[in-house]
Each structure stands twice: as structure tokens, then as C-alpha cells.
Image: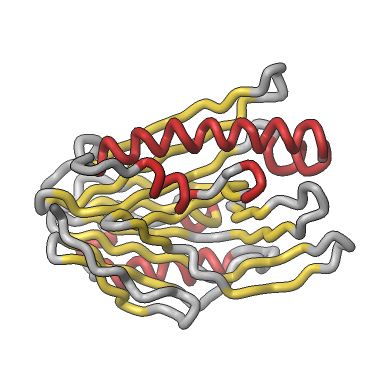
Amino acid sequence: MINRIRVRPLLICAFVFLQLLGIPALVSATTIAAVRTPTDIYLGADSKVAGVRPDGTVYYQVKCKIGQVGKIFFAAVGPYEYEPTGLNIRLLLIEAQLPGASVVQTVERFEAFYADALTRTSRTAQKDSPTVYTKYFLNGHVYVYFFSSENGIPRYFERIFTIQSSNDPLTVGVERLDCPPGCSSNAPTILGIGYANVMKNVSSNVLETRPPIQVITEVIEASIREDPDHKSGGPIDILHLNKDGARWVQKKKECPEIHPYTEK
């Protein structure tokens, strides 16, 4: 019996590599869908990335949107990465890890590092590229999701970083959801972000009739199909994670092999 579903709808979510200081921007609508059961996590993401060169030329690439650092897997949505200001999820997550630290402690350290880097990036955009700042940062959001298994318990963490208006100095706020405790440990949970009309119609009892991999595939395919601007697209990558480790259910060649790890 399913007693909880968490699906966060967005009209269009974008992965963005910023066009600041003349560096090409990469912009892509995206869908992330995950299912957590009492023993497993299934994570899926689309692949299409639209690139914009400094001269305005648009091109498309296929990217792997699911990453790994140790036993933590992650995916993100929004203006989430810009190397010159240190805004890099993978590198900050590596920096956040300490010997003997729990996943919760690592995510907490990452949160502080990332909020600082996003603040610097937003202020850089505000100063050097007001058009980019207004379009991607002003009152904008970055959604970062982490997935792991710790002590045999599948866990996910949602962090929403919000760039708070154009106040001087600009600041970044953080919303948090940890599961558990923010979910029932005995019932499947769906976490999703993508095209709004699809995400808001995901039924709370869908997992009673279909397995997680099928649900993830159907949700992402529907989000891709309903996106009127065709900014998102396949193929779909799906990861399966539990106490015994992680494996790709399906992946494209751009996704690296999983690095072996242990829970300890």
C-alpha cells in the first residue's frame, strides 16, 4: 500500500553551464524520476543537452546526468555548474567527504560549500552578465538530489538552493528534505521533477500496478513527449541502488561504469 508520493512539478527545468566571460552556455530541460522502496532506490534521467555558443548558435549534445562520488549518487537541475567560480557538484562533494563521516554529514558539508559557490557565481553573473543573471539566477533555483544506501537503509536527500532576489548583497537560501526521516520507511516513495503537466498527474498508487523501472521510464518518456520546446530527450539512463551496491539497469556510452564501493 502506497501512502506517500512526492513529485515536484516544474514547467521546464534546465541544466545550465553559464555563458559568462565568453564561455559557451549549455542549457537543457530535464526530467529526473526516482523511486525509493524500503530496500532499494531506482533513479532515472533523460539525456538531451542544448548548447549555446557565444555567437548564439544552438547545438545539441547527449550527456549523462547521473554522477557518483563514492557511495553517493547525484543529479541536479538548474544553473548548477560553472567552473571558474568553483560551482561544481562533483568536486564540492569530494571536498565534503571526511574519513568516517556519515552520508548525512557529507551532505550537510556539501550544502554549505555549494551555497557559498552559488552565491559567488550569482554575484559574478549579476555584475558581469546582467542578462544571464536575470534569465537564470534572479529568484531562480538549483535542485540537487543525492541517493545512497547506509546501514542497509536506502536514503535520498533533496536540497533546493534559491537565489534570493537582487538584494545587495545577494544571498542564497536552502530548503531541505531528507528521506528518512521525511518519508515513510515502510512505503514506496516517488521523487520527480520535470515537465509540470506530466509530473502533477503521476498517480499516488502507480506503484501498486507497475514496477519501479517501468514507472520511471513512463514518467520520463511522458515528460519528454509533452515538452513543447523539445529541449529534453532520450535515451534514458536508469540506476538501481541498494545495500549490496549499485548497477546500471540501462545506460548510454556517455555514462561511466560504477566505481566499486562498500557501505563502510
Regarding residue 175, the answer to whether it shows in the image is yes
Residue 228 in the image: state x and y as whole percent.
Answer: 67, 64
The residue drawn where x is 71% and y is 17% is 168
Image: 123 above or below 263:
above
Drawn side of residue 34 relative to residue 78, left or right: left
Q: What kind of colouring is applied to the model shown?
A: secondary structure
Residue furthest to the front: 99
Image: 130 above or below 30:
above
Query: Which of 264 and 38 lies nearest the eye of the viewer?
Result: 264
The residue drawn where x is 17% and y is 42% is 184
The residue drawn where x is 58% and y is 36% is 118
Drawn side of residue 15 relative to residue 135, left or right: left
The residue drawn where x is 37% and y is 41% is 96
Regarding residue 187, the answer to whether it shows in the image is no
Drawn side of residue 116 relative to residue 147, left or right: right
Query: Which of 132 and 99 lies nearest the eye of the viewer?
Result: 99
Q: Quadrant of residue 225?
A: bottom right
